[in-house]
Image: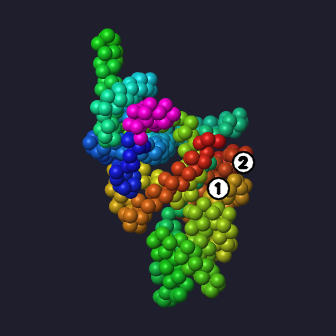
Amino acid sequence: MDYSKFVTAVLMNDKNSLREFYEVLTKILLKFLLVRMDANLEDAKDSAQNAIMFGVEKIKNKELEHPDLIINYLFTTAKHDYLKHQSKRKEVSYDEIPEHHSEPGAQLDKLLDEERQGVLQRCFKKLKPKQFNYISYWFENPQSETAFVADHFGISVNNAWTKKHRIIQVLKECFEKNINK
Amino acid sequence: MESSRDPKSIYKKIDAYVKGTLSESEIDALWEEFAKNPDLLDQLELEVGIRKIIKDRIAKKKIAPTHSLPNWVWHASAAAVVLMVALVQLFRVDTPTNLEDFLVLNIPNEQLETADGIRSKDMLITTADSLLNLGFAAVSAGNDEKAIELFSEVISNYDEEPYVSKAFLNRGIIKYNDGAYQESISNFEEAATRASENRMISEKAYWYLGNAYVNIGELEKALEAVGEAYNRDGIFRKPAFVLYRKLSYDLGEIDFEEDTSSDN
């Protein structure tokens, strides 16, 4: 994602490019809010769109230009917008159930989509037994250092990472091949 | 703007994020990387998806803790189970278990046959023994190709038992773990036939042969092989019994009178 091109597209009002940028930025901010703020989908959509809208205004007013600052601004604004709406809701809704905090792991699961997960599941079943065994061990022992996994399989730490990466690539290729079928 | 860090370091960060070992500031920094390179979000999603699949599988396999019970409970349970199985058979209700739950997914390296520690006839390590040991070392080092080469050398040059059956068995194990079930079958069959006088090797060969047959969907042949493993009454007796029952059930061949009498 080239943020300097995004700035140019805003300043030139290049609608075609902007449409593409909006799509990518919405996807990033939406997932950020779902995972980092534990937002629900509708609220996340609203706050992601608001953040982009505010960001575009800032760029138009020449108040925002540097790519790193744009990223930072978008995340911060999306977060504040979400929190602002949440607190407003709390003011009027007295019977609301107290805010719950999911575990970080569970929040990451909000990235998943049932249909896509089904495709991944089918790809996972197609792994060779050795790959299956390796990747299962890797994720079944999340608190272990890579050295522990490497030791278990009698390989070096570097090879352990390479092996994991290759299996992920196998799954990725299978997933991409099957997702649009 | 492209991602500022090298891909390897980012992949490691993603791995740590999925495992829940990143600090809050590291997570924020990683999200900035996602903003610079949104494809990395797909990588994150994929890893989260894999973790979920594995977590679900573990949850499915978790067994309730065991408590010791008085003998009468066991007798009553056994009677209830027999009755229940009879009813299930009567109404032909499909079992909720999957055949794959009873299978060996990956044969551990310890199952490879090496040279015997001390031989009864002599105390010498023969060349064939050395080749078997070298093959084992190659598998342990992850060099399966070399191991296949060494075991094949035993098969070609040392037509003597127990070396050849061990070499066939080992080749079968490597092929099985590689998902080449058809090739593993021919090796296990050779091992089982040649080791007919060696209960341990033939039992192992039949047990894995049965598993390989299940993997290619040849359930009747699998039933026969697993039955042979069970009959050898060795270390695979219990899993062979369970798989035999499952296969019999799935093939509609379970015989309760014979079954209950053999259990007693």
Q: Which mark is residue B215?
A: 1
Residue at the location (32% across, 37% down)? Answer: A65
Residue A39 or residue B150, whichever sits in front: A39
Magenta span includes A19: yes
Residue at the location (37% across, 63% down)? Answer: A157
Residue B65 x, y percent position in the rendering:
41, 42
Q: Is residue A37 left or right of residue B196?
A: left
Residue A90 x, y percent position in the rendering:
31, 15
Residue at the location (66% across, 75% down)? Answer: B194
Q: Which mark is residue B10?
A: none
Residue B76 x, y percent position in the rendering:
54, 38
Q: Is residue B247 left or right of residue A144?
A: right
Residue linked to disc 2: B251
Q: Amino acid at mark 1?
A: Asn
Q: Is residue B174 left or right of residue B28?
A: right
| Element carrying mark 2 | loop
Chief SS of the magenta region: helix
Specify the quadrant of the image occupied by residue A127: bottom right
Q: Which residues are magenta?
A: A5-30
